[in-house]
């Protein structure tokens, strides 16, 4: 696709608009000038008609007759061509006519009271035909008193004036067009200068310099303020993602370093001197245990990476019954709860569903329940409560463990975070479980938070979008799964 230029488009738009305006101005000016000149020309023709009619008089003869004083005919309106006129009575008797009247044959048929354009010998003429009373009338003469006067004059001078007016208007408009286009181009270049400054400021952004520092013009330009804010927001997000990725790589390398070092030392000890078959077996079993731990860490890291990418765009998500998803997680973790002497309680206040992957949701509940079970004292209980309103589903997992500090509550969902006992290697955790849970919940449009429980311990709140228009509340009481301490 060919590259385009906003500046060139704007300049082309301004030039075209100014050109159309110039064409309209010249056309309108020519039309108005022609209309006014023709109107003045028609008035001049009517005045000539009145003048010609005034030259018709009654003679003193008996009986009296109409005579025409031809020596008083005014000069033609144009020097190079003669005017044409004719004076007749209502009966058609010719009283007077111009010497070249016979050349105006088509004008003779013009209706009385109207104007007409015609050509005589290649010269354009315009004439008028009117009924005029005889001005010189005797009181005692009762005879014809109405005349039909036809008068025509050439249009060469009028057309020349119209042409000159069009030329002068066109030249003036062209000069104004050039000046306005030059002014518009200069104004657009100055107006786009803040955008160039913004581009130059964005060009210096790099992994070592994330600040966008546009000039004062860009910051004070109304149209660029949304773009500047959007670019800053984007850069802040990219900076956070870059730092998270860098921290993830550093933390992952740190986490991988320990099991690899342990595995390497185990194998080196086996090779230092000859050993018995039982010693080799014990060393290899220890190496396999280290490899198993390393494999679990790699699987957790890959799962977190997939969770942060979110569901595939072309993937059709299924409608998941959240109560059934929670029940599946409870069933899977019943043996672990029995081992720790912890009682699981499921309080289902609503039946609701959301669009997600069933395995992902089951992993969310399993991670949260496992974390709560491992750090709850024997004889305590872990509550899972499910409720819903018209827009979202609320899942709460509450334990009766030692709880977390305010700093731990803030960072508990960060990757490889081990602020309290729930994130130590003694329990087998790597600090990725809650990070994976948070990534999965947010991938399906939800949110997750940690807070202190009213009776001590920690409460995790999960909010997910509701697929049905309203939740269907159930009257079933709380379900006590089992008392695992017995």
Image: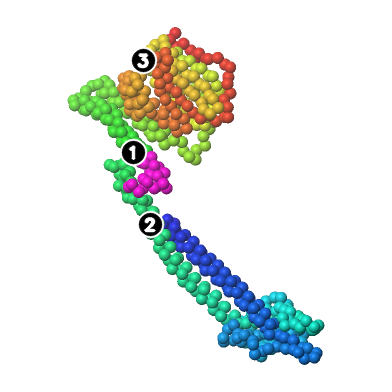
Tell me how far mark 1 sits from mark 2, CA to CA.
33 Å
In front: label 1 or label 2? 2
Q: Is residue 223 magenta?
A: yes
Q: Residue furthest front?
A: 139
From the top left corner, tell me how far across and down residue 425 is, in percent. Answer: 31, 22
- For the question of whether residue 138 can be seen, the reply is yes
Q: Earlier in the sequence, mark 1 or mark 2?
A: 2
The local secondary structure at tag 3 comes to loop
The residue that mark 3 highlights is 402
Residue 132, quarter of the rendered image: bottom right
> What is the span of residues highlighted in magenta in the rendered image?
215-235
On screen, residue 200 above or below 352: below
The answer to whether residue 291 is left or right of residue 135 is: left
* Residue occupying the point 65% across, 90% down: 71
The residue that mark 1 highlights is 239
Q: Residue furthest top?
A: 486
Residue 472, quarter of the rendered image: top right
Mark 2 residue crowding within 10 angstroms, few (<14) / some (14–19) / many (20+): some
Tell me how far mark 3 sits from mark 1, CA to CA.
36 Å
| Main secondary structure found in the magenta portion | helix
| Residue nearer the viewer, 442 or 168 | 168
Q: Residue furthest left?
A: 273
On screen, residue 272 above or below 35: above
* Residue occupying the point 33% across, 34% down: 244
| Residue nearer the viewer, 254 or 298 | 254
Q: Earlier in the sequence, mark 3 or mark 1?
A: 1
Q: Which mark is residue 189?
A: 2
């Amino acid at each position: 696709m060919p590259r385009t230029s906003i500046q060139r488009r704007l300049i082309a738009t301004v030039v075209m608009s100014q050109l159309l305006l110039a064409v309209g101005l010249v056309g309108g000016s020519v039309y108005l000038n022609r209309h006014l000149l023709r109107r003045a020309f028609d008035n001049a023709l009517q005045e000539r008609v009145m003048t010609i009619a005034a030259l018709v008089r009654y003679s003193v003869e008996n009986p009296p007759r109409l005579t025409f004083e031809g020596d008083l005919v005014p000069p033609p309106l144009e020097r190079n061509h003669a005017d044409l006129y004719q004076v007749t009575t209502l009966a058609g008797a010719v009283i007077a006519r111009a010497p070249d009247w016979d050349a105006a044959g088509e004008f003779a048929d013009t209706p009385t009271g109207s104007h007409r354009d015609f050509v005589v010998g290649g010269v354009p003429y315009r004439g008028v035909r009117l009924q005029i009373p005889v001005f010189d009338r005797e009181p005692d003469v009762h005879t014809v008193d109405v005349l039909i006067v036809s008068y025509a004059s050439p249009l060469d001078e009028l057309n020349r004036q119209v042409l000159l007016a069009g030329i002068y208007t066109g030249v003036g408009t062209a000069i104004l067009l050039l000046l306005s286009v030059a002014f518009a181009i200069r104004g657009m270049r100055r107006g786009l200068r803040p955008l160039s400054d913004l581009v130059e400021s964005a060009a210096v952004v790099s992994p070592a310099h994330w600040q966008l520092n546009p000039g004062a013009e860009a910051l004070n330009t109304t149209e660029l303020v949304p773009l500047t804010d959007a670019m800053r927001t984007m850069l802040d997000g990219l900076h956070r993602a870059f730092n998270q990725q860098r921290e993830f790589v550093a933390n992952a390398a740190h986490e991988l370093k320990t099991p690899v070092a342990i595995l390497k030392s185990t194998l080196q000890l086996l090779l230092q001197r000859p050993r018995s078959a039982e010693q080799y077996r014990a060393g290899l079993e220890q190496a396999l245990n280290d490899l198993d731990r390393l494999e679990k860490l790699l699987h957790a890291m890959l799962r977190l990476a997939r969770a942060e990418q979110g569901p595939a765009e072309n993937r059709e998500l299924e409608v998941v019954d959240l109560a059934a998803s929670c029940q599946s997680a409870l069933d899977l973790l019943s043996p672990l709860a029995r081992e720790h002497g912890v009682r699981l309680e499921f309080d289902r206040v609503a039946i609701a569903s959301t669009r997600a992957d069933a395995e992902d949701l089951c992993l969310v509940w399993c991670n949260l329940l496992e974390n709560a079970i491992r750090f709850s004292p024997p004889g305590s209980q872990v509550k899972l409560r499910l409720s819903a309103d018209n827009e979202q589903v609320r899942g709460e997992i509450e334990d009766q463990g030692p709880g977390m500090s305010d700093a731990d509550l803030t960072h508990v969902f960060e990757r490889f975070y081990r602020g309290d006992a729930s994130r130590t290697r003694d329990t087998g955790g790597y600090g990725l479980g809650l990070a994976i849970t948070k990534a999965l919940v947010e991938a399906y449009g939800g949110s997750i938070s940690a807070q202190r429980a009213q009776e001590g311990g920690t409460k995790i709140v999960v909010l997910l979008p509701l697929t049905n228009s309203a939740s269907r509340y159930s009257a079933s009481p709380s379900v006590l799964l089992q008392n695992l301490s017995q």
